[in-house]
Image (spheres, rainbow, N blue to C red):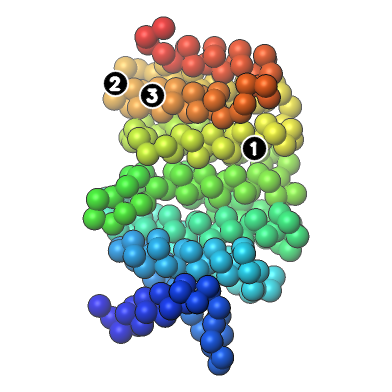
Amino acid sequence: MSDSRSRLIVDLQRIEAEEYQLRDGEAYTDFIHLMLEYIGDPQPELRDELIYPTFYQWILKKRLFTAEELRSFLNVLLDEQHLFYEIGSTEDDSVFTRTFSVLPVALIMQLHIKQPFLSAEEYRALKDALLRYYREEKDLRGYVEDGGWAHAAAHGADALDELVQCPESGEEVQLEVLEAIKDMLQNRMFLFVEEEDERMATVVDTMIVQGRLPWNSISGWIGSLGDCKDWPPGRSQRIAQVNSKSFLRSLYFRRGRQDRSEAFKQVLLAAEASLNRFC
């Protein structure tokens, strides 16, 4: 274990114990460089239990950073050594760097939603990076036995949920996000079993609540999930069908019955029935 990694673990454990306050003479920026360096550490103790909670507390709860500092963090998180580190690879530890880089991005967007600080150009670059990541990520494992949570589809969906709530997220962006979710559900390679469908359903439910898309766009997209039933038979088709069916069920039960319109209910039921071989 490297000296810097060992020191970071000790420091973050102490910072957690002291309710994320620093001692006299310490600066938050003193720790950020190492936190970004080890953000994808293969061991969940550092990555999942120390680095991410510290980012959560410092970025979102305590709001310690200026807009310029947050922009700087975003530039690093979205670069080729973080969100796109060895993008396209599968079954190796690089996935942890990617999936734990996207989580602080979601935290920063929550601040932007409450008090916008990104320019229109910066928002577009962020949106393009997140959609590119969701399209290009191929390691879709949920829980990895030796490394803990990877959960790319879920973590990416968390970021997309923040993206669609940003004030700049108009109809075009919302439609792009819907297509990215559809592509993830119908990825042809990986059957989701770690409730990724619930995290993706959150994004679409947010869109419905916001009402930024016409109902016919939402209903048309929901209906289009059934198209995969007509793919050539085989494992790829089966994965797309089961993932899409699970997603529709998650979305159906997400909202209380009193809040679910009859039109919404019928669209979801029809789409689910089209994918259900046991109806």
Q: Quadrant of the N terminus?
A: bottom left
Q: Quadrant of the C terminus?
A: top left
Q: How many marks?
A: 3
The residue pinned by badge 3 equals 242
Q: Relative to 23, is 246 above or below?
A: above
Residue 66, labelled with which disc?
A: none
Could you tell me which residue is drawn at 30 percent across and 64 percent down?
43
The residue pinned by badge 1 equals 206
* Sequence-wise first label, 2 or 3: 2
Confirm whether residue 181 shows in the render. no
Residue 234, labelled with which disc?
A: 2
Could you tell me which residue is drawn at 56 percent across and 37 percent down?
202
Between marks 3 and 1 in the image, the one whose residue lies nearer the viewer: 1
Residues packed near mark 3 inside 10 Å, few (<14), some (14 to 19) or many (20 plus) = some
Q: Secondary structure at mark 2?
A: loop
Query: Residue 147, located in which quarter of the rendered image?
Result: bottom left
x and y, in percent, of residue 69 in the image: 63, 74
Residue extending farthest top: 279
